[in-house]
Image (cartoon, rainbow, N blue to C red):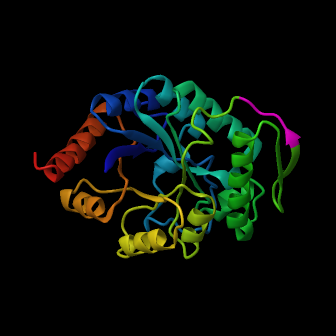
Amino acid sequence: MDIGVAIFATHDALGPAAVARLAEERGHESLFFAEHTHIPAERTSPFPGGAELPRRYSHTYDLFVAMTAAALSTTRLRVGSGICLVIERDPIITAKEVASIDALSGGRVEFGVGAGWNREEMANHGTDPRLRMAVLGERVQAMKAIWAQDEATYRGDHVSFERIWSWPKPAQRPHPPVLVGGYGPTVLDRVLSFGDAWFPTYGPVDLLDRARELWAKAERPVEVQVIGVPADARALEELERAGVRRAVHWLPSAGLGPVERALDRFEAAVAELHGE
C-alpha cells in the first residue's frame, strides 16, 4: 500500500512547493491538494465535518497553480487533486490544465474528481445542484475524449463540442488516473462509469464493505484509495489487509513546524505498521 499526504494549501501557510519537497524528501509517494474556488459568505449547505467550516476552506491557492508548483519542485512525487470540483470548471480548460501539468511533470498527475457538498458554491458557477452528478460525469467523459483523441468530439446534455484540437496530451496515456471522490448512494456507479479508482474519505464504518462491493461489480481493475486516514497503525493495517491501494493523511494548513510534527506522527504510525 502506498502512503501519501494531502493539504489545503493556503497563502498563509507552508507553500505548496515546500510541502511537496518535504513530502518527497521524507519518502512519501504522493501529495494531494484540496480545492474550493471560493466559499459563499451566506450558505445553507451543512459542512460534512459537522462543526463550523474551517478557515482554510476559503483561503486555498488555485488547485492547478498549487499542483504545478509541487510538480516542478519535485522529481518523483505523484501530485494530485483531492479533489477537483469538476462541476465548477470548464471541461476544455480543465483538460488543458491537467494535460499540461502531466506533461511538465513527466506523467505524475493523479486526477481526483468530485461534485463537492457546497450547493451555494456550485450554484455560483452556474451549476444546478440537482444536476451535479450528471454534469460531473459528462465533463469527465468529455475531458477523456480531449486527452485521447487528436480531433475530439463530445455530445452530451451538459457538454457538447465538435472537432477540437487541444495539445499537449497527457504524458500518461490515455490519461492520468481518474479517482472518483464521494460517498453517496450512487458513487460506486460513478466509479464504474468513468473512474480508475474510488477515493473516499476515511471514516464510515461500512467503507471496506462498499469497497468489496465495488470490486465484486467491476469487470475491469478498479482501485480503492482512501484520503483522510489517521496517524494510526491499526487503521493503516486494516486498509492494507483489505487491499486498499493508497492511504493519504491530511496535513495541517500551517507553518513548517506543525507540518513536520504531523508528518512525524503519521510516519511513526507507518513505521509501526511495518514493524519498525
Magenta-drawn stretch, dominant element (helix, strand or loop): loop
Q: In this view of the protein, which residue sits in the foreground, 59 or 134?
A: 134
Determine whether 1 is above or below 184 in the image. above
* Residue that appears at 55% across and 76% down: 185
Q: Is residue 88 left or right of residue 7?
A: right
Image spot of residue 187 (x, y percent)? 56, 69
Q: In this view of the protein, which residue sits in the foreground, 133 or 42?
A: 133
Residue 90 at least partly seen: no
Image spot of residue 206 (x, y percent)? 38, 76
Q: In this view of the protein, which residue sits in the foreground, 96 or 177?
A: 177
The quadrant in which the C terminus is found is: top left
- Find the magenta span and give its range: 163-167
Image spot of residue 45 (x, y percent)? 59, 68
Q: In this view, does 21 lie to the left or right of 66?
A: left
Q: In which quarter of the image is residue 99?
A: top right
Name of the residue lying farthest toward the right:
162
Residue 228 at least partly seen: yes
Q: Is residue 15 left or right of residue 187?
A: left
* Residue that appears at 27% across and 32% down: 26
